[in-house]
Image: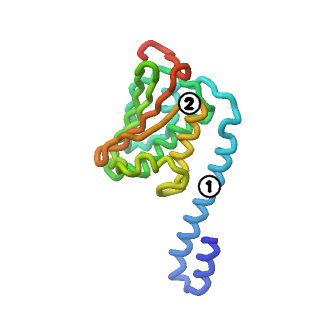
Amino acid sequence: MAAEGYLDLMEGSDGLHQQPFKDKILQTLEKIKRQIKFTKEYETLGSQQPIWQDIDTLIRRCEVPPSLHLHRDRCVAEVYADPMVGKVFENLLDNSLRHGGEHLSIIRVSCEVTDPVFTITWEDDGVGIPPDEKERIFERGYGEGSGLGLFFTREILAITGMTIHEDGILGKGARFVITVPNGHWRATHCGV
C-alpha cells in the first residue's frame, strides 16, 4: 500500500520532484524483501535437529568491514544449537553496525565458564542502548529497520535453552551476554 501511495503521488508531480517518491518506494520494497527473507528463515527455525557447532568458526564467518576490528578471545568451545545459530552472530554484528554510531571501532567476543553455565559475550564500543530499551530490543518489530534481527536471535537461542540479554552502559557500548546451559556446550581444546 505504501508503494502504491508513492506511485499515486508521483503521477501528479513533474520529473524533478519524483526522486523522493522513488526513494521511498525503494525503501518500502527493501523492507518487503527483508520481511520475506525473515519469514522464510523463521519457518525453518527448529525444523532440524540441533548440532554441535564451533563458536570460533561461527564468529570468523561474520563479514566484518575493514573499518571495524573484531577481537575475539579464542572461544575454544562448541555449542549444541539449532543449525541457524550462525545467524545470531550475524544479527549481533548487524546490530552493532546499524546502531553503534559513527565512532564504532571495535567488537570484542569472549567466552567464559561460570559454573554451571557457559557465557558468550559480544560487546562493542558504540553508543550503547538506553536502559528502558534493553528488553524491548528483543521484541518483534521494535526499533529501526525491520525490528526482526534481535527477536530472531532470541528465538534461535531459545530452541536449545540458551538466553540472551543486554547489559551494556549507555554511551560506552552495547554488551550482549548469551548464556548456554550446562550440557549444551563443550570445550574443544585446552583453554575453556
Disc 2 marks a residue whose amino acid type is: Gly
Q: Which residue is mark 1?
A: 35
Rendering coords of residue 168 (x, y %): 34, 41
Rendering coords of residue 166 (x, y %): 41, 41
Label 1 SS? helix
Disc 1 marks a residue whose amino acid type is: Gln
Residue at 60% across, 54% down: 34
Rendering coords of residue 48 (x, y %): 69, 32
Q: Using the image, determine if residue 16 lies above or below residue 128.
A: below
Q: Which mark is residue 48?
A: none
Label 2 SS? loop
Residue at 33% across, 44% down: 173
Q: Residues within 10 Å of mark 2 (few under 14, many from 20)?
A: some
Single out the residue that lies furthest toward the top.
190
Residue at 64% across, 28% down: 50
Rendering coords of residue 21 (x, y %): 54, 75
Left or right position of 32 against 54: right
Single out the residue that lies furthest toward the left.
171
Left or right position of 13 against 39: left
Residue at 62% across, 60% down: 32
Work out whether residue 119 or residue 100 is closer to the camera in this orientation and state it.
119
Which quarter of the rendering shows the N terminus? bottom right
User: Gap in Å between the C-alphas at discs 2 and 1?
Assistant: 26 Å
Q: Residues within 10 Å of mark 1 (few under 14, many from 20)?
A: some
Which quarter of the rendering shows the C terminus? top left
Query: Residue 85 appears in which quarter of the rendering?
Result: top right
Left or right position of 133 against 86: left
Q: Which mark is residue 161?
A: 2
Query: Residue 73 appears in which quarter of the rendering?
Result: top left
2 or 1: mark nearer the eye: 2
Q: Using the image, determine if residue 125 lies above or below residue 35.
A: above
Work out whether residue 65 or residue 35 is closer to the camera in this orientation and state it.
35
